[in-house]
């Protein structure tokens, strides 16, 4: 049985879907054998209803007590979800004996949930196809004629069914690229108080395990990244390779930890990005776009840096933005010039790319315009508007100024926003060191 859960937390009231998974990992162990690590799946980061990371979870279990497992899961989701928040609408999905058709439909649905914008109706159509109750409440999970069964439960409007189906779909079909996050949770009595985690031990853990762990510390901006600040039960989370996350965890000193769980996840994979042409972009999706810098970078109110790129074939243009939270990344962007060829990665909103990464593939030649040097060795002076140049020493004249090449203070290659501004699902450049392209990881 695969169990998918989403939308149990609240921006204002806290809660955490991964914490529910952590509790269920312990409670379900008595009813069967858990399959692999629980999954933490990050969905489209542009969804307006999302909480901080837009994450859904999936748990796999081999059991001969399916009804007991379902009851335990629903009891836990019902008791821990922040249902008083109008934007908290949990969904739970149970899948067993998935047919080939169901697997295919789930795979497509999961991809769309990560790269596109889905509505509750999209989830209901999939549920109608495979659940005996077809969207009326709790399905029976019986065979629907396609060789598969699906059971589900919605709370309130059930928007969480979207993420629950997507996470279960990833679990059913597997994931080709994945990373891990080891999350430590607080004791219940401490939730709502300031977190007590020793910063020096985090920095030490980071230095010992980087680059096998990442996004633990933002060195350039002197920020601890792995410790959240909201009212949720997460104490800290270490992202990276499984063994390295466990190693780093062992070096961190903190307040007492209630429990910890190692999640397999699509964080740090760029699964949300779609290759497209500039004229194909739609708001609310994330892209990899090629273009030529068509307008020079300019800094606007708030410290955001904006520049334009254009498609050399369609001539379509789009703005790109390095917003103020990207800090030192903006210094790279400010050095771009018209004519530079780039590849940009990020989400599109209001016809502007919110930059996550940029690859500079070619730097345009830049020149400084100077008065020409006379044959006598003296630099000429302007003879007046539109009248060329004249040497005051010997009287020689010239119509053309001197064009002196300017060395660019910028290298080709990949650049990224710093860890403190990175989205959970964005692939850090430390994972992209293979190949011939130069990368400049942000630390």
Image (spheres, grey):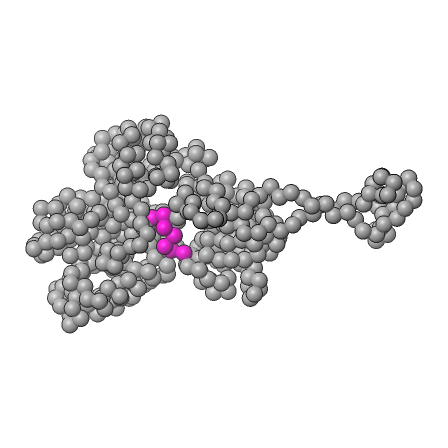
Indicate left or right for 19 with 177 as reference: left
* Secondary structure that dominates the magenta span: loop
Task: Answer yes or no: is residue 372 visible.
Answer: yes
* Residue 349 x %, y %: 46, 57
- 272 in the magenta segment: yes
Relative to 239, residue 48 above or below = below
Q: Residue furthest right?
A: 394
- 60 in the magenta segment: no
* Residue 12 x %, y %: 31, 45
Q: What number of labels is visible?
A: 0
Indicate left or right for 338 with 430 as reference: right
Look at 38% across and 52% down and name the residue there: 270
In magenta, the rendered stretch is 267-273
Relative to 246, residue 95 above or below = below
Look at 48% across and 42% down and name the residue there: 440
Look at 26% across and 56% down and name the residue there: 174
């Amino acid at each position: 049985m695969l169990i998918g859960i989403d939308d149990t937390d609240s921006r204002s009231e806290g809660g955490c879907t991964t914490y529910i998974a952590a509790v269920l990992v312990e409670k379900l162990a008595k009813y069967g054998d858990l399959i692999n690590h629980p999954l933490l799946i990050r969905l489209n980061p542009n969804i307006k209803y999302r909480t901080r990371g837009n994450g859904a979870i999936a748990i796999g279990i081999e059991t001969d007590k399916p009804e007991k497992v379902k009851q335990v899961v629903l009891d836990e989701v019902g008791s821990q979800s922040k249902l008083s928040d109008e934007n908290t609408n949990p969904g739970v999905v149970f899948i067993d004996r998935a047919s080939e058709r169901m697997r295919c439909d789930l795979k497509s649905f999961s991809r769309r949930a990560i790269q596109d914008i889905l509505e509750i109706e999209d989830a209901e159509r999939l549920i109608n196809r495979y659940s005996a109750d077809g969207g009326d409440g709790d399905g029976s999970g019986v065979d629907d004629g396609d060789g598969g069964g699906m059971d589900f439960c919605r709370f309130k409007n059930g928007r969480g069914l979207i993420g629950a189906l997507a996470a279960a779909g990833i679990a059913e079909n597997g994931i080709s690229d994945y990373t891990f996050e080891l999350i430590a949770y607080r004791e219940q009595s401490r939730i709502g108080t300031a977190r007590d985690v020793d910063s020096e031990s985090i920095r030490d853990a980071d230095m010992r395990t980087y680059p096998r762990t990442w996004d633990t510390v933002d060195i350039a901006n002197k920020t601890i990244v792995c410790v959240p600040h909201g009212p949720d039960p997460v104490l800290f989370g270490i992202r990276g390779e499984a063994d390295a996350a466990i190693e780093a965890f062992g070096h961190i000193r903190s307040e007492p930890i209630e429990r910890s769980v190692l999640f397999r996840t699509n964080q740090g994979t760029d699964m949300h990005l779609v290759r497209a042409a500039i004229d194909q972009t739609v708001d609310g999706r994330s892209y990899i776009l090629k273009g030529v810098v068509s307008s020079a970078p300019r800094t606007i109110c708030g410290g955001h840096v904006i520049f334009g790129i254009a498609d050399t074939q369609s001539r379509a243009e789009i703005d790109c933005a390095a917003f103020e939270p990207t800090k030192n990344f903006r210094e790279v962007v400010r050095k771009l010039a018209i004519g530079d060829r780039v590849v940009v990665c990020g989400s599109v909103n209001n016809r502007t790319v919110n930059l996550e990464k940029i690859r500079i593939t070619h730097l345009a030649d830049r020149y400084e315009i100077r008065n020409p040097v006379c044959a006598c060795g003296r630099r000429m002076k302007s003879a007046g508007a539109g009248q060329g140049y004249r040497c005051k020493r010997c009287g020689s004249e010239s119509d053309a100024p001197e064009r002196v090449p300017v060395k660019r203070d910028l290298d080709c290659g990949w650049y990224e926003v710093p860890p403190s501004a990175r989205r959970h699902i964005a692939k850090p450049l430390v994972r992209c060191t293979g190949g011939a392209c130069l990368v400049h990881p942000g630390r």
